[in-house]
């Protein structure tokens, strides 16, 4: 059994190693896959904050992923057409600068998370799962019929947005950017988990009544976690859109929300690098199984089932020999 | 296990030869609900490659799962890693919009066997992009023209609430000269049309035009046939194609649909195509299969004259469209979209099988409405 | 907009509602008794439709098709319960969501593997085809009237089953205290399998009935599944009565919203915009309804526990 800390280093090192090796052997597509895994890991780490630490099973995190994506799509689209975004009296210039897009994506998705969280946290358990799903569906149908930005067809951005000092069109440079962001997000996550806020949140998940008796409001703790979680997933959405140079309503679909949950559970709930392991495994499976058979979903389903039934604690739990996801 | 190996072999159907001169990447939908269309395009395409007997064309086939992000990834892979010369295969407009501009931007030829979004026909056209099927509006325009020829005065028109649906109604109205009894947008993926049919009944229309691809069309037709509303129905071929017609059954009998291809178009190429396709795959070919077949033959005809590496020469060779199409006459307009006849077909029953029969020409030598915006 | 049209639309909403109820009843029963979220319920709907299509194509009998849909879905339900679901009762909702999500993948692609990618043919029987003239001169499809009748009969039957039979007593007891009824000597795992199979059969029946007027294809279960979830959440999870009320509410909102919202917007803007805005708002309407209900009553209309 491998201690979890080494496992984490191994996972991140492996991800970086794959990308570097692919760069050396001139296989840009492998770098693209590694970038995809990195971005999905960021999104799932966001979810892991709400789901793992806060115990909030959100089947609507695609909302934030999609909002991040559309923040990128809309800003870049307006930069392409040199027409400012008209918001009533306000006119915002489009931009192709990644940092600006990220800030926008984070702002928009946290705002959405605040509103959705405020309303959804009135419920709990299955009702919470379903109300988040409902919000996801609302955004999905809105995006499908929002013809100003392509509706169902989505929006294509012809050139990847820029980052000062980097050539983002070079696969390995874009990968590095995403990888650094992943590391930052992971550091944030682990700091949070061990901070007073994280401990209180953990307590609020397990016994809300006790948290209340010490004068904390469990709902506000959960709301804060939900907003942070949405912000991180929103950032990932902006990156994902830049990876594909394309956004479409499928980023809002409930299947995507489901996949994000899958990533977290696959890797291990409430584990620092669970989402990283989950994303790497998922992308690898998608790629290899997809190459083997047309009906690869059957095998993906079977593998997921086996993990739920026999490997509690996900991949990280399995490898580190600590099956319980919460200690 | 055996089945798995078979499937793997089918997917990795790469006609590999030591020195394949030309590498073709096919990104199409082979899994999920829309797989039927992609499978037909693939089978039509591969049939033509096989018949040509050429062993210097390598085709790499990948499944896009009908997801735009996967399609973009695959095209990156094909261009960057596989270093393909030509891309083809995409079924859906939104996937094409995600892939084609980037692909042609990287200097790869793209031959579209199905999707023809208006952007790519107009301002976003490219010298390297060729559409072998149709511009998206074409079949709807033909439906409008046929409505005029038939003398319909008051149509009720409906389509799903998404860009292709709006294009469909716009296309119909571009040609149609009568009045409108009603215009409806339905939900994408809707399965129950009782409410819409009630509105049609109450509208006093003399005809119904609809664009509801895939399962939506099946649901609509079955429910419409059962509703007792007996207004004549007209639509583009997508809801009356060989693949889904059997699922609609008698409900589709007599419905008029517009198509640039039909299995009874009278020419040698088409006859041979229908026969050999049926022999090879054990089913009647569809519209999509014919488009895949034509795409491959166009490619082969161009390869006879030039190498893809020589972009200008290869582009010129493609522009000539010097191949015998299943549609008979075939030529490209200035924006690399077909100029072709579009037929009106009627759904009939031949023994146990439901199929289509040509009843007239809706539009002759029809080009699309966006060519003027295209500056190459 | 005439009164006839409004009545016809209300009937349509009712018909959509009772079919949703067939789906939602099983879902809510399974949740109420076993505490399980079953995302794969839509797959059982699909199994029913495919079984009906295959059997009625082979035998030419629609009724035989219906019977086999019930049998196939119940069987698939029982097998899945014994192989997989049984191990999930003690798990948290998260594991259940993931495992049943995995089952969707297996069912969908497995069905495509068996039946291919093209939709199957299933038509309504000749004796139910065509419209019926209702009082007031309304022409309405006979088959849809039959669907409403079947839905109401099943709802009544379920009520009798749960309120008036021994099995019903056990089911209600299982909802309240599963340890206790196990202690009283009821074979709890057999009871669970039975309930799961019952829920599956209802879903299969709905799939077959609706399949006759829609397209029988892979993935047909997912949209209905989401709607059924909306229904049971609005009604209160675990409550059959809630599922019934919720189903009718959702059916009516969905149908009438699609008609009246565009009309409403025509008062404010030009017809084309009204059509498009109204249509998009209509597709969001049931989710808005659900959020409003949950914000007002966090455990649904008839829900007791969270």
Image (cartoon, rainbow, N blue to C red):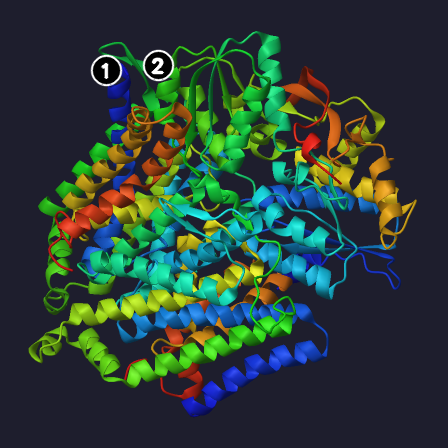
Instruction: Answer whether residue C193 is visible to the viewer in this image.
Output: no
Residue at position x 24%, y 25% in the image: C10
From the viewer's perspective, is C280 left or right of B40? Answer: left
Mark 1 burial class by Cα count in 10 Å: few <14, some 14-19, many 20+: few
State how far apart marks 2 and 1 are (Cα): 11 Å
Q: Is label 2 in contact with label 1 (beta carbons under 8 Å)?
A: no
Instruction: Answer whether residue A50 is visible to the viewer in this image.
Output: yes
Mark 2 burial class by Cα count in 10 Å: few <14, some 14-19, many 20+: some
Asked whether the residues under marks 2 and 1 belong to the same chain, the reply is: no
Instruction: Please tell me the numbered disc located at residue B119.
Output: none
Residue at position x 25%, y 60% in the image: A117
Query: Circle 1 is placed at which residue position?
Result: C3
The image quadrant of residue B256 is top right
Residue at position x 68%, y 28% in the image: B368
Q: Position of residue C69 (x, y in %)?
A: 38, 41
Q: Quadrant of the N terminus of chain B?
A: bottom right
The image quadrant of residue C124 is top left
Query: Circle 2 is placed at which residue position?
Result: B202
In this picture, is C169 found above or below B208? below
Q: Return the residue nearer the eye: A208 or B13.
A: A208
From the viewer's perspective, is B315 left or right of B177? Answer: right
């Amino acid at each position: 059994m491998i201690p979890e800390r080494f496992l984490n280093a191994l996972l991140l090192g492996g991800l970086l190693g794959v990308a570097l090796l692919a760069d050396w052997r001139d296989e840009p597509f492998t770098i693209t896959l590694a970038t995809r895994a990195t971005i999905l890991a960021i999104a799932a780490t966001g979810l892991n904050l709400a789901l793992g630490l806060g115990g909030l099973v959100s089947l609507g995190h695609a909302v934030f992923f999609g909002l991040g994506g559309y923040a990128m799509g809309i800003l870049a689209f307006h930069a392409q057409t040199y027409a400012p975004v008209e918001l009533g009296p306000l006119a915002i210039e489009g931009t192709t600068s990644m940092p600006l897009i990220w800030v926008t994506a984070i702002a928009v998705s946290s705002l959405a998370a605040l509103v959705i969280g405020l309303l959804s946290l009135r419920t709990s358990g299955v009702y919470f799962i379903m109300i988040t799903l409902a919000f996801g569906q609302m955004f999905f149908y809105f995006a499908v019929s929002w013809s100003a930005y392509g509706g169902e067809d989505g929006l294509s951005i012809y050139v990847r947005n820029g980052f000062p000092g980097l050539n983002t069109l070079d696969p390995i440079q874009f990968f590095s950017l995403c990888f650094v962001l992943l590391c930052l997000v992971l550091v944030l996550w682990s700091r949070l988990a061990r901070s007073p806020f994280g401990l209180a949140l953990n307590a609020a998940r397990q016994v809300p009544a006790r948290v209340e008796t010490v004068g904390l409001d469990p709902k506000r703790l959960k709301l804060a976690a939900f907003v942070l979680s949405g912000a991180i997933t929103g950032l990932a959405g902006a990156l994902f859109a830049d990876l594909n140079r394309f956004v479409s309503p499928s980023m809002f679909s409930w299947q995507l929300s489901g996949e994000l949950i899958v990533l977290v559970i696959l890797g291990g709930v409430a584990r620092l690098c669970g989402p990283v392991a989950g994303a790497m495994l998922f992308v690898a499976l998608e790629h290899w199984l997809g190459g083997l058979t047309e009906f690869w979903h059957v095998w993906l389903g079977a593998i997921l089932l086996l993990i739920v039934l026999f490997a509690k604690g996900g991949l990280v739990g399995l490898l580190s020999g600590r099956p319980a996801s919460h200690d | 296990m055996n089945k798995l190996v078979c499937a793997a072999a089918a997917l990795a159907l790469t006609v590999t030869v030591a020195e394949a001169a030309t590498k073709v990447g096919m990104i199409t939908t082979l899994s999920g609900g829309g797989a039927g269309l992609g499978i037909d395009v693939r089978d039509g395409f591969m049939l033509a490659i096989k018949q040509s007997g050429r062993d210097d064309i390598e085709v790499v086939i990948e499944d896009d799962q009908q997801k735009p992000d996967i399609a973009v990834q695959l095209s990156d892979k094909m261009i960057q890693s596989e270093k393909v010369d030509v891309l083809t295969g995409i079924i859906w407009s939104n996937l094409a919009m995600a892939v084609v501009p980037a692909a042609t931007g990287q200097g790869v030829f793209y031959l579209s066997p199905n999707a023809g979004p208006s952007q790519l026909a107009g301002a976003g056209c490219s010298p390297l992009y060729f559409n072998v099927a149709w511009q998206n509006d074409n079949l709807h325009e033909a439906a409008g023209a046929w409505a005029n020829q038939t003398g319909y005065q008051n149509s009720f028109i409906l389509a799903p609430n998404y860009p292709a649906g709006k294009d469909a109604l716009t296309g119909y109205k571009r040609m149609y000269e009568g009045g409108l009894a009603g215009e409806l947008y339905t939900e994408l993926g809707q399965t129950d049309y009782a409410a819409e049919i009630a509105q049609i009944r109450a509208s006093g229309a003399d005809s119904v035009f609809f664009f509801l691809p895939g399962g939506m069309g099946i649901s609509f037709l079955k429910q419409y046939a059962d509703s007792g509303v007996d207004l004549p129905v007209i639509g583009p071929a997508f809801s009356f194609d060989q693949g889904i017609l059997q699922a609609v059954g008698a409900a589709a009998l007599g419905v008029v649909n517009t198509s640039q291809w039909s299995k009874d178009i009278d020419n040698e190429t088409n006859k041979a195509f229908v026969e050999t396709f049926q022999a090879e795959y054990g089913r009647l070919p569809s519209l999509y299969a014919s488009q895949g077949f034509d795409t491959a033959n166009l490619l082969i005809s161009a390869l006879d004259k030039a190498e893809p590496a020589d972009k200008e020469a290869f582009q010129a060779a493609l522009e000539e469209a010097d191949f015998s199409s299943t549609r008979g006459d075939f030529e490209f307009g200035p924006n690399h979209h077909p100029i072709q006849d579009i037929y009106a077909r009627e759904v009939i029953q031949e023994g146990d099988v439901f199929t289509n029969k040509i009843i007239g020409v809706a539009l002759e030598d029809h080009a699309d409405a966006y060519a003027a915006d295209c500056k190459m | 907009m005439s009164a006839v049209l409004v009545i016809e639309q209300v009937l349509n909403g009712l018909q959509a509602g009772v079919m949703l109820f067939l789906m939602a009843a099983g879902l809510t029963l399974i949740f109420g008794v076993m505490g399980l979220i079953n995302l794969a319920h839509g797959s059982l709907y699909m199994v029913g439709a495919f079984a009906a299509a295959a059997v009625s194509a082979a035998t030419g009998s629609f009724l035989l098709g219906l019977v086999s849909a019930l049998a196939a879905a119940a069987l698939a339900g029982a097998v899945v319960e014994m192989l997989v679901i049984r191990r999930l009762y003690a798990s948290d909702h998260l594991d259940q969501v993931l495992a049943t999500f995995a089952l969707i993948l297996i069912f969908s692609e497995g069905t495509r593997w068996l039946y291919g990618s093209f939709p199957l043919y299933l038509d309504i029987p000749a004796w139910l085809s065509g419209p019926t003239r209702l009082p007031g001169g309304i022409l309405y499809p006979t088959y849809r009237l039959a669907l409403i009748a079947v839905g109401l009969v099943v709802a009544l039957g379920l009520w009798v089953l749960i309120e008036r039979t021994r099995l019903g007593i056990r089911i209600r007891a299982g909802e309240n205290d599963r340890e206790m009824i196990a202690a009283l000597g009821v074979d709890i795992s057999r009871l669970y399998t039975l309930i799961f199979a019952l829920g599956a059969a209802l879903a299969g029946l709905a799939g077959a009935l609706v399949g006759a007027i829609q397209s029988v294809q892979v993935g047909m279960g997912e949209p209905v599944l989401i709607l059924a979830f909306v229904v049971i959440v609005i009604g209160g999870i675990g409550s059959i009565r809630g599922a019934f009320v919720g189903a009718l509410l959702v059916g009516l909102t969905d149908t009438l919203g699609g008609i009246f919202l565009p009309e409403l917007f025509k008062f404010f803007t030009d017809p084309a915009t009204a059509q498009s805005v109204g249509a998009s708002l209509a597709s969001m309407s049931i989710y808005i309804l659900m959020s409003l209900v949950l914000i007002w009553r966090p455990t649904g209309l008839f829900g007791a526990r969270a």
